[in-house]
Each structure stands twice: as C-alpha cells, then as structure tokens.
C-alpha cells in the first residue's frame, strides 16, 4: 500500500543545506520525475532526506524511493484540485507563508538570523517557497475531499484488529492519566519593588552608555529563549496567542530606539523592552525578563490553600475536574482540561513524557490518589505548588480491543482512508501525464505503476 505522507519542505534548512553543504554535493542535479509540466529534481529528494536526518527522523530503507513517490502523489493531487477548482486563495498561501516565517523567526531569534542561516532575504525565501506551499495546500485539500466521507464502524474496527497476525500485535508500555491543579504564588511586595528598582538601574546604565541593552540581557535576563542572543526577538502584532499581552502591547507602543520602563506581567514577571525597529505589524525588539522570586512563606501559604482544595475533593464536595477549573492558575486548563495530554491529544501518556518532579510525586500514589500539595518549578523557571491526581494506570500489555479500542479505531480509520486514496489514485493516475527517470524506476519498484503511464521516461 502506498504511504501517504505528503512532503513538507523545510525551506530554511534546505537553503542552509544548499549553502553550508555545497561542497558535499557530488551528483549533478537532474529531473527525476514529472507530472504534467511540474517537475521533481534530484536535489528536492536529497534535501528532503537531509532535512529528515537533521531532524533526527529515522530513515527507512528506500527513503529516496518513498519521497519521490510522495512527490508524484502530491503533484497529482494538486493538479486534480485545480481541475476541481478547490478553493486555495492567494491570501491563504500568504498567510501560510507568514506563519512559517514567524516560526523561523521564533526559532532563530530574528529575521536577520533567518536570512543569515538561509543565505537569502525573507522576501526571497517567501518567493522561492510560494509555489511549493500552494501545491502542498492544494494537495491536502484534494486528499481531504477524497476521504471526507470515509468513516469506520465498530464492526470494521473489530475486523481490522482480527486481521493483524498475533505475532504482530504491538506490546504497549504502561500509560497513565495524570491531572494537576497548579498555583503560582506571588512574590512579596518588597521583593517586587527590589526587582523593579534593579531593572530601573539597568535602564539608567544603558541610557548612560555604560553597557548595551544586549549585554545587559545576556547578563541579567531570565528568559532562556533570548538571553544568549542579547534578548532579541522579532514579533508580530497579530501573534496574540504566542506572546504575553503586556509584553506585546508595550512593545508596540514604543518607537524605534525607545526603551520602556519596567512593566509587570502576571504570567512571567517584569519586562524591560527596547524597540530596535518597526515595520508595519512587525517589530524587532530586545527584552530583559526578571522573575521576582517567591519565598518559602508564599509557597507555604499556597500549600495551605491547596490542602483545603484537596479536602474538598476527597470529601466529594467537588470533583477534581471542577476544582481544577475553579482553582488552577495554569492557563492550559482552560483550553485542554486538567489532564496532561500526549502528542496525539490523548489523556493517556507514557511515564517518560512526564518531568522528573511529577514522576517522583506519582511514585507515592495509587490509582485514585491525590497527592499532598507539593512544590515544583515549571518550564519557565517559575516556582509553584500543585496537587497531582493519578486517575488511572494501564499495565504493560499486548494491544487489545477492550483496553485500546480508541487506538485501534484510529489505526483502522487511517488504513481505510489510505485505501480510499489508493483506490482513487489507481483509477485516476492514467488521466495524468506522468514520467519517471528510468534509473529511478529501475531502482524503485514502487514507481513502476507511475512509469506505466508513459512508455518513454527520461
């Protein structure tokens, strides 16, 4: 069965590879495939393999053959989407490009850093990527159209699982459902005043020219994401979900070259921000973050509060879930609920997805237990107190319908959708002009069905 993993090109990394590894390319570029007037270059395949390797992905045998097949499928689907006039507007493509640029900027710190890595301007990167992005979006729209009415019934799930050979049924490690109620106590007023005065001192030294903002950020900032690059970020006014609202609004009130007073964010701490340049909805800024430390006094007070919450739950006056929505100060609870989610969105997670502090707390709990209030430090370095609830724990076991129905149903549905796409391709590929390089076709048996649509090849 064809593997339908549509290619997602990592343009910045591909450009970096083209620049940094030019001396390692030994094969002259050539066309290895085409669908209509859309060509696939050997360098496209090589860059996709290089990107996967840099990302730490495990490359299966025949990776080049699979990627070439995926490229052919993507072009076939995109062409069909155009024939069917599926709506992918230029505005949607530009929005997708802007989103990717913002991700690159977040990763590397600024547009300048992205341009240095890529060896091209942001404008050139977007221009080079635009056609491929639109092709990806068209292909995805066509795939969704093909499988939109494909559903799965319990009978089909059972039949799917029964067809799996007994020696191929996977063994599943133990998984847990873990809930949390988190409180982040505020620092004492005198501590906050001390931090504020320290940041005012940084400001005075920067204004007097005794040190640069970048040097001050490297020395004093507590933001791990920007400290090493002198507090530099490039931000967009519309990225309200990615940035603290106080930080964002303060940044866009500043003129180029202007520095703010220290501003307080309840989520993080105190910010000192300098705007280096503004261009429309984009700004290049530097910032220093200081987190007022909480003392044991504040942590102990939070423990008392959570101990009362725990007593309410154990006395069945309130459910853990309702208590989390009522008392937790973790913003993710509003969107995702009080349980830690796995990569697939499931509340069942392997223990290695949990931090060491949580694992240590869970070691003292039985299923159904709620921990005593315990101190912890979150990924931002902020100290808090939490209750940990072990809702359930699965034993290591072979996958079965009773315990793992939802997982099996997802697998069965994916297989059925892949089969629907396979059937569609078998029926419709002859309607496209497809060519595959003869050498590639000889090395890749999976490409023979495409080569059959033309007797010539390259």
Image (tube, rainbow, N blue to C red):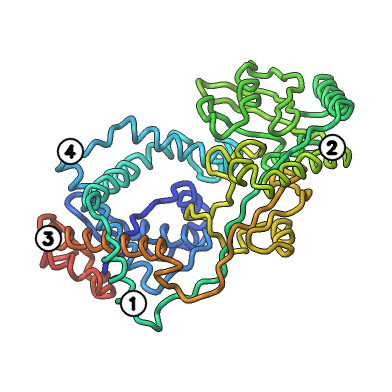
How many angstroms separate mark 4 from mark 3 (CA)?
20 Å
In the image, is 57 to the left or to the right of 65? right
**Of marks 1 and 2, which one's residue comes earlier in the chain?**
1
Visible in this render: residue 384? no
- Of the 4 image quadrants, the one containing the C terminus is bottom left
In the image, is 220 to the left or to the right of 22? right
**Of marks 1 and 3, which one's residue comes earlier in the chain?**
1
In the image, is 40 to the left or to the right of 323? left
Q: Secondary structure at mark 4?
A: loop
Q: Nearer the viewer, residue 231 or 407?
A: 407
**Of marks 2 and 3, which one's residue comes earlier in the chain?**
2
Disc 2 versus disc 4: nearer the observer: 2
What residue sits 17% from the left and 58% below the top?
Answer: 424
Disc 2 versus disc 3: nearer the observer: 2
Marker disc for residue 85: 4
Q: Is residue 385 above or below residue 57?
A: above
**Of marks 2 and 4, which one's residue comes earlier in the chain?**
4
How many angstroms separate mark 1 from mark 2 (CA)?
56 Å
Q: Secondary structure at mark 2?
A: helix
How many angstroms separate mark 2 from mark 4 (CA)?
61 Å
Marker disc for residue 427: 3
Query: Which residue was labeled with disc 2?
Result: 298
Q: Pointer 4 and pointer 3: residues touching (CB < 8 Å)?
A: no
Other-residue count near label 2 (Cα within 10 Å), few / some / many at <14 / 14–19 / ≥20: some
What residue sits 19% from the left and 42% below the top?
Answer: 82
How many angstroms separate mark 1 from mark 3 (CA)?
27 Å
Disc 1 versus disc 4: nearer the observer: 1
Quarter of the view holding residue 266 = top right
Query: Which residue was labeled with disc 1?
Result: 164
Q: Secondary structure at mark 1?
A: loop
Q: Nearer the viewer, residue 273 or 186?
A: 186
How many angstroms separate mark 2 from mark 3 (CA)?
68 Å
């Amino acid at each position: 069965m064809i593997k339908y993993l549509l290619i997602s090109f990592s343009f910045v990394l591909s450009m970096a590879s083209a620049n940094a590894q030019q001396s390692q390319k030994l094969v002259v570029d050539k066309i290895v495939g085409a669908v209509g007037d859309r060509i696939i270059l050997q360098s496209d395949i090589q860059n996709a393999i290089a990107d996967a390797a840099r990302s730490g992905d495990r490359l299966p045998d025949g990776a080049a053959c699979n990627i070439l097949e995926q490229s052919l499928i993507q072009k076939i689907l995109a062409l069909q989407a155009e024939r069917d006039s599926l709506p992918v507007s230029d505005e949607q493509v530009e929005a997708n490009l802007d989103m990717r640029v913002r991700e690159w900027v977040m990763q590397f710190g600024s547009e300048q850093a992205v341009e240095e890595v890529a060896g091209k301007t942001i404008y050139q990167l977007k221009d080079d990527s635009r056609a491929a992005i639109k092709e990806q979006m068209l292909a995805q729209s066509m795939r969704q159209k093909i499988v939109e009415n494909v559903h799965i019934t319990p009978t089909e799930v059972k039949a799917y699982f029964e067809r799996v050979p007994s020696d191929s049924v996977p063994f599943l490690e133990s998984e847990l459902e873990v809930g949390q109620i988190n409180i982040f106590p505020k620092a004492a007023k005198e501590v906050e005043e001390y931090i504020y005065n320290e940041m005012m001192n940084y400001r005075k030294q920067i204004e007097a020219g005794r040190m640069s903002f970048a040097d001050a950020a490297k020395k004093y900032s507590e933001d791990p994401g920007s400290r090493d690059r002198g507090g530099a970020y490039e931000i967009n006014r519309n990225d309200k979900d990615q940035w603290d609202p106080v930080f964002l609004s303060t940044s866009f009130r500043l003129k180029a070259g202007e520095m703010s007073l220290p501003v307080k964010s309840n989520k993080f701490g105190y910010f000192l921000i300098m705007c280096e340049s503004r261009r429309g909805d984009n700004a290049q800024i530097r910032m220093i973050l200081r987190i007022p430390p909480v003392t044991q006094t504040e942590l102990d007070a939070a423990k008392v509060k959570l101990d009362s919450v725990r007593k309410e739950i154990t006395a069945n006056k309130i459910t853990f879930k309702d208590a989390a929505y009522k008392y937790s100060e973790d913003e993710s609870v509003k969107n995702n609920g009080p349980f830690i989610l796995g990569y697939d969105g499931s509340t069942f997670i392997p223990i290695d997805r949990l931090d060491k502090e949580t694992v240590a707390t869970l070691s003292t709990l039985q299923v159904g237990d709620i921990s005593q209030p315990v101190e912890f430090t979150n990924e931002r370095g902020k100290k808090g107190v939490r209750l940990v609830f072990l809702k359930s724990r699965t034993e290591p076991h072979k996958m079965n319908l009773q315990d793992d129905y939802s997982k099996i149903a997802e697998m069965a549905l994916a297989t059925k959708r892949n089969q629907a796409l396979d059937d569609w391709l078998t029926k419709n590929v002859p309607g496209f002009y497809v060519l595959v390089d003869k050498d590639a076709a000889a090395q890749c048996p999976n490409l023979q069905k495409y080569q059959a649509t033309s007797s010539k090849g390259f």
